[in-house]
Amino acid sequence: MKDIVNIFKAMGDETRLQILLLLNSKNVCAKGISKHIGISEAAVSQHIKILKQSNIITGHKEGYYIIYNINKEVLQKSTQFMNLLIDEDIEKNNSIFGVQEFNILNCKNNCKSMKRCCKKKLEGEIK
């Protein structure tokens, strides 16, 4: 689960998304990314660091430059997670990610202030 969180955090920035869109069309070095997106090489370096830490991109050396490309396997993992959220089989999803099933009675017993969300569900489900 931590890997998924890191992927989404890394992709939660507009500039990093622009970098990924560029790398999706061709493999580029940091200088090329800088020129294409219009930000400094130092800023690109910081964004690349975050993308590499989450394994979204990888780099290989070609002469003097490091050429970056997208790690499609890592993005596939995040796509599978998104598909689980769309999937209707809640029990399967919860078991895969170790999430406890929502139990309205636990909510009733543990919530000090039964406000709208639990109270409405409780009234609707248990009458």
Image (cartoon, grey):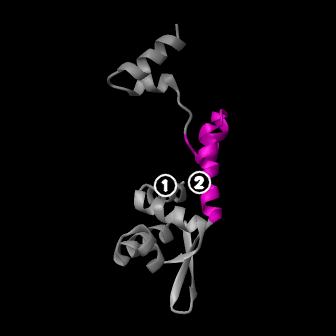
For the record, the magenta segment spans: 72-99
- Asked which secondary structure carries label 1, the reply is helix
Q: Amino acid at mark 1?
A: Phe
Q: Residue at x 48, y 65 (%)?
A: 19
> Is residue 94 visible to the viewer in this orientation of the structure?
no
Q: Which mark is residue 78?
A: 2
Q: Specify the principal SS of the magenta part.
A: helix
From this viewpoint, which residue is outermost toward the left? Answer: 113
Quarter residue 119 falls in: top left
Classify residue 94 by image quadrant. Answer: top right
Q: From this view, report whether residue 85 is shown above or below residue 64.
A: above
- Marks 1 and 2 close (CB-CB < 8 Å): yes
Please, is residue 43 above or below residue 1 in the view? below
Residue at which label 1 appears: 8
Point 42% across, 74% down: residue: 35
Residue 16, x across and y down, in percent: 44, 62
In percent of width and height, residue 106 lies at 47, 26
Left or right placement of residue 26 versus residue 37 in this view: right
